[in-house]
């Protein structure tokens, strides 16, 4: 690559300018964006599955309407991010194909089962809470289309987080059985939520370069720590207990110390060995195959309209 162009690119990054689709960019920058953005889009789409599973079983019409809207939002987020990734020269087909064939990564968190209604609360509260923590700094990612997609996504995610917390608040203040259900969901979702932020900084191969390119503005560990610090008081406020005996407030750091994350579990789930990994991929593939007639009909309709417009 031409050193003068590289230098100009680096200078633009240093000035905090957005890089736009038609601007020159190093191939490695393009590749890392396609990697991260496609994984991110896949996560939004696969993330519809564990919650979609509960739409028919939501305990009231209000809860059903809210959950339906929330799951639909996640689908929209996936589409914005796929569209933003397409501006880098990759196609939707390539990305979707990589997901369906099991080659592409998506967030580990969506490979865990949703066993009770309280899991829907825990997902909104913790999983969407973690997603916001990670996505707020991405609004300032150096690639313009990615950063702009994040603005609306973050607004919607904050509703999602609150709907989840509201479910947990209701259950935690309910009968003894409801409170137990909420605590059980927190017990099962807490550690996987901490894993969402990715491997620790000293074991995160992409972080240093992504930070230099200002794609990532904060490291995996920094964001994980922030998430713990805001979430612990929320659990206390509704009388639930974070399942970590080592969790203690560290006065000197002004932050919580927390116990060791099971990184073996994380890497196993990244490798596709998560409890519901096969089920998720099968659901995506089935949806794609069963939706073929819709795509064909839409394509035929568009062609007919184009012919009419010409005539
Ligand atoms: N689940 C699956 N894979 C992960 C996870 C995770 N929770 N965390 C890290 N990885 C993967 C990375 O994708 C990377 O794999 P690759 O090199 O084959 O692409 C590898 O583990 C090493 O990790 P890092 O070097 O730390 O990778 P990176 O710098 O990309 O950081 C992170 C990972 C923080 C997830 C980053 O990609 C990111 O911020 N992505 C955008 C947010 C996102 O994808 N959120 C999805 C869940 S939220 C939601 O959908 C509601």
Image: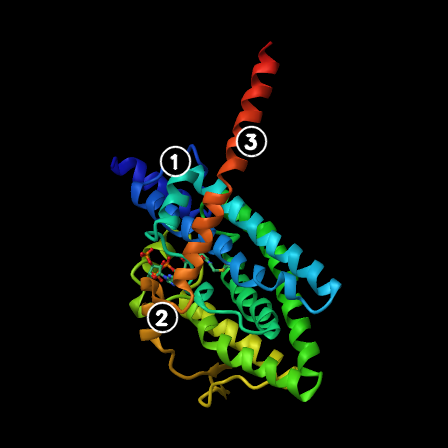
Would the CB of label 2 be found within 8 Å of ligand 1? yes
Q: For this rendering, which residue is in front, 24 or 55?
A: 55
Marks 3 and 2: in contact by CB < 8 Å? no
Q: Residue at x 56, y 64 (%)?
A: 128
Q: CA distance from mark 2 to mark 3?
A: 40 Å
Q: Is residue 142 above or below residue 307?
A: below
Residue at mark 1: 89
Q: Quadrant of the C terminus?
A: top right
Q: Secondary structure at mark 1?
A: loop
Q: CA distance from mark 2 to mark 1?
A: 31 Å
Q: Compare marks 2 and 1 and give the one earlier in the sequence.
A: 1
Residue 286 at x, y = what percent? 46, 49
Q: For this rendering, which residue is in front, 158 or 225?
A: 158
Q: Quadrant of the N terminus?
A: top left
Q: For this rendering, which residue is in front, 156 or 285?
A: 285
Where residue 260 is drawn, which disc sits there? none
The residue at the far top in this view is 311
Residue 220 at x, y = what percent? 41, 66
Where residue 266 is drawn, which disc sits there? 2
* Residue 132 quadrant: bottom right
Q: Compare marks 1 and 3 and give the one earlier in the sequence.
A: 1
What number of labels is visible?
3
Where residue 298 is drawn, which disc sits there? 3
Q: Compare marks 2 and 3 and give the one earlier in the sequence.
A: 2
Q: Residue at x 51, y 58 (%)?
A: 47
Q: Is residue 117 above or below residue 94?
A: below
């Amino acid at each position: 690559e031409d050193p003068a162009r590289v230098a100009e690119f680096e200078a633009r990054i240093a000035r905090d300018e957005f890089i736009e689709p038609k601007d020159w960019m190093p191939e490695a920058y393009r590749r890392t964006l396609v990697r991260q953005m496609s994984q991110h889009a896949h996560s939004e789409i696969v993330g519809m599955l564990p919650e979609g599973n509960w739409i028919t079983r939501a305990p009231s019409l209000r809860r059903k309407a809210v959950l339906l809207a929330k799951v639909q939002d996640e689908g929209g987020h996936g589409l914005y991010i796929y569209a933003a990734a397409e501006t880098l020269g990759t196609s939707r087909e390539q990305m979707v194909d990589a997901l369906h064939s099991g080659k592409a990564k998506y967030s580990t968190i969506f490979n865990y089962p949703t066993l009770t209604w309280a899991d829907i609360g825990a997902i909104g509260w913790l999983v969407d809470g973690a997603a916001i923590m990670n996505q707020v700094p991405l609004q300032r990612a150096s690639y313009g289309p990615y950063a702009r997609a994040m603005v609306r996504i973050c607004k919607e995610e904050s509703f999602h987080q609150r709907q989840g917390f509201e479910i947990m608040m209701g259950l935690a203040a309910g009968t003894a059985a409801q409170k137990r259900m909420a605590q059980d969901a927190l017990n099962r979702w807490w550690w996987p939520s901490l894993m969402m932020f990715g491997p620790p900084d000293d074991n995160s191969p992409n972080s240093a370069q992504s930070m230099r390119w200002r794609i990532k503005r904060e490291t995996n560990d920094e964001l994980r720590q922030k998430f713990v610090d805001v979430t612990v008081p929320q659990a206390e406020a509704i009388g639930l207990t974070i399942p970590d005996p080592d969790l203690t407030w560290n006065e000197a750091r002004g932050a919580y110390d927390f116990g060791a994350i099971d990184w073996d579990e994380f890497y196993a789930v990244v490798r596709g060995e998560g409890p519901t990994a096969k089920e998720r991929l099968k659901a995506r593939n089935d949806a794609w195959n069963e939706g073929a007639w819709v795509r064909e009909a839409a394509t035929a309709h568009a062609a007919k309209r184009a012919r009419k417009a010409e005539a």
